[in-house]
């Protein structure tokens, strides 16, 4: 095809592309930074922007993405999208049913917005180095997707990695061949090392990136052909969804009945329309700390040092501190990650086992796998900075214009001391402005609400006292975030 005609054609097709960002993962192998309620795609691991923000900005020409996430992430994602001036549609899953149903719901929504758009499906937690190379791959995929192909982006393997699934293309194509794409022969699971080496030598295998491009109607048609029960259940869930504060919320009783399958199992392994376009650039699925070390800038000894770190005679190690000093002497191939409530120390070759460690935390009934000590809320955050017998101290941050729910506690009283900003405090129907260095007392059983009426962040110290200080000691009367049925603050 003439290059200029091809360029003109892909530019016109770009206008029909709707980005779909999948943000449902929990990122357990990046614990303790990644937690179930604040997963890796929301973390600003090394820089000013989170992974989901980088994903949104990957193709500057594309606006108004459809973001699929869970209930616990919706407010944090909305805030992060607002930070990068991104306006889109958010779909909230009441439970996780894997990627195939999530993409089906996004496809139904995209068609309802008008036409039959091309969907560029991207996980929210991938890192791509060369944006020009990504655009080159996208241009080739656009032409295939416009011809009713279901296109995935394959990464030429740099090493025999056992942490990725692989895709085999037609014999003789090879990972250094044409950039125009090739029909997929088969998908294979994560291999052992010997098999991965065999794949690497053959030149006919690519890493499965989990990124796709296709027409919304083609995806839904193939889903109906190959997984009709999933298609029907997704349709039922979408038709029964409700619009809540501009967010599409799926009903749990219906959506929970969707089969739990990935797009690879549900469609890609069965369809005759599966094609691959090579993504010839550095690509990372930042799924573990070894991958983080590989992707980060290192010192002359191969160490990554983020935060307050003092390393002497250390080699090829990763150190990250959220505040406290990490001091290391004479270690190599080590991962050390320090957060406010947990420290991970691991051999770099065994970082895949972090997932099983997190499972042990859950089995033991601990909370460190769920959330950080500083817990994010729609209105801001709170950090439990001290506690003892019958008392707890929190640092509360309330964003400008936001409010906590109107609530009451049966077992605890609260004393609020404003550190910075101005608080509007409601107690039993009466309102009071509380300024810096002033305080107010909330009695047990008293209805109260905290609001930041100003344009600057509000910070205050909350001292709780009582016979029971659990977060479930809350009775809500009204809430700006529709959390009346929930029991968290």
Image (spheres, grey):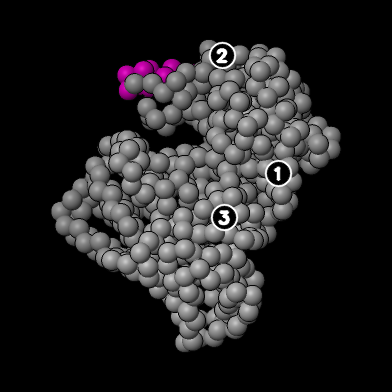
Q: Which mark is residue 248?
A: 1
Residue 109 appears at what percent x and percent y? 75, 37
Left or right of residue 240: residue 302 = left
Q: Mark 3 points at which residue?
A: 76
Q: Mark 2 points at which residue?
A: 185
Q: Earlier in the sequence, mark 2 or mark 3?
A: 3
Marks 2 and 3 in Cβ contact (< 8 Å): no
Secondary structure of the residue carrying tag 3 is: helix
Q: Is residue 153 magenta?
A: no
Q: Earlier in the sequence, mark 2 or mark 1?
A: 2
Q: Which residue is drawn at 27% across and 37% down?
A: 349
Q: Distance between the residues labelled 1 and 3?
A: 16 Å
Name the foreground residue: 278 vs 462. 462
Residue 102 at least partly seen: yes
Instruction: Residue at the far right: name it.
Output: 115
Please report the bounds of the magenta region as a residue range.
193-204
Residue 169 appears at what percent x and percent y? 55, 17
Q: Which residue is drawn at 63% across and 43% down?
A: 92
Q: Which of marks 1 and 3 is nearer the N terminus?
A: 3
Name the foreground residue: 155 vs 487. 487
Q: Main secondary structure of the magenta part?
A: helix
Residue 94 appears at what percent x and percent y? 59, 39
Name the foreground residue: 172 vs 211. 211
Q: How far apart are marks 2 and 1 (CA)?
A: 37 Å
Instruction: Residue at the far left: name it.
Output: 330
């Amino acid at each position: 095809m003439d290059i200029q005609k091809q360029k003109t054609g892909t530019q016109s097709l770009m206008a029909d592309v709707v980005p779909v960002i999948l943000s449902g993962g929990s990122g357990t192998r990046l614990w303790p930074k990644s937690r179930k309620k604040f997963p890796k795609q929301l973390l600003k691991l090394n820089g000013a922007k989170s992974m989901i923000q980088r994903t949104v900005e990957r193709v500057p020409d594309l606006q108004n993405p459809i973001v699929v996430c869970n209930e616990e992430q919706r407010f944090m994602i909305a805030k992060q999208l607002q930070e990068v001036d991104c306006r889109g549609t958010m779909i909230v899953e009441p439970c996780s049913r894997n990627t195939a149903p999530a993409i089906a719901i996004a496809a139904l929504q995209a068609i309802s917005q008008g036409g039959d758009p091309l969907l560029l499906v991207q996980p929210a937690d991938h890192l791509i180095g060369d944006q020009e190379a990504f655009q080159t791959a996208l241009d080739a995929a656009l032409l295939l997707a416009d011809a009713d192909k279901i296109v995935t982006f394959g990464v030429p393997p740099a090493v025999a990695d056992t942490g990725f699934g692989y895709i085999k293309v037609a014999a003789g194509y090879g990972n250094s061949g044409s950039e125009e794409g090739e029909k997929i022969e088969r998908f294979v699971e994560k291999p052992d090392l010997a098999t991965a080496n065999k794949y690497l030598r053959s030149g006919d295998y690519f890493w499965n990136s989990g990124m796709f491009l296709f027409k919304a109607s083609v995806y839904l048609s193939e889903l109906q052909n190959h997984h009709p029960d999933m298609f029907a259940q997704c349709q039922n869930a979408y038709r029964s969804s409700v619009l809540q504060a501009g967010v599409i919320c799926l009903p749990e009783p219906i959506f929970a009945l969707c089969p739990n399958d990935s797009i690879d199992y549900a469609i890609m392994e069965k369809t005759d329309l599966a094609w691959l376009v090579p993504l010839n650039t550095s690509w990372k699925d930042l799924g573990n700390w070894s991958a983080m070390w590989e992707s980060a800038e290192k010192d002359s000894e191969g160490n990554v040092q983020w935060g307050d770190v003092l390393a002497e005679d250390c080699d090829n190690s990763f150190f990250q501190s959220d505040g406290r000093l990490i001091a290391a002497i004479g270690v190599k191939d080590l991962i050390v990650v320090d957060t406010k409530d947990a420290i991970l120390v691991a051999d770099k070759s065994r970082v895949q086992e972090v997932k099983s460690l997190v499972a042990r935390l859950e089995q033991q009934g601990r909370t460190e796998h769920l959330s950080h000590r500083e817990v994010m809320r729609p209105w801001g955050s709170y950090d439990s900075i001290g506690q003892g017998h019958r008392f707890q101290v929190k640092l509360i941050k309330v964003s400008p214009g936001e409010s906590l729910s109107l609530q009451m506690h049966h077992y605890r009283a609260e004393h609020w001391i404003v550190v910075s900003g101005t608080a509007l405090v409601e107690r039993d129907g009466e309102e009071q402005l509380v300024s810096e260095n002033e305080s107010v007392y909330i009695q047990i059983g008293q209805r109260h609400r905290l609001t930041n009426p100003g344009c600057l962040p509000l910070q205050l110290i909350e001292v709780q006292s009582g016979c029971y200080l659990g977060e479930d000691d809350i009775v809500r009367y009204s809430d700006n975030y529709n959390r009346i049925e929930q029991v968290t603050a």
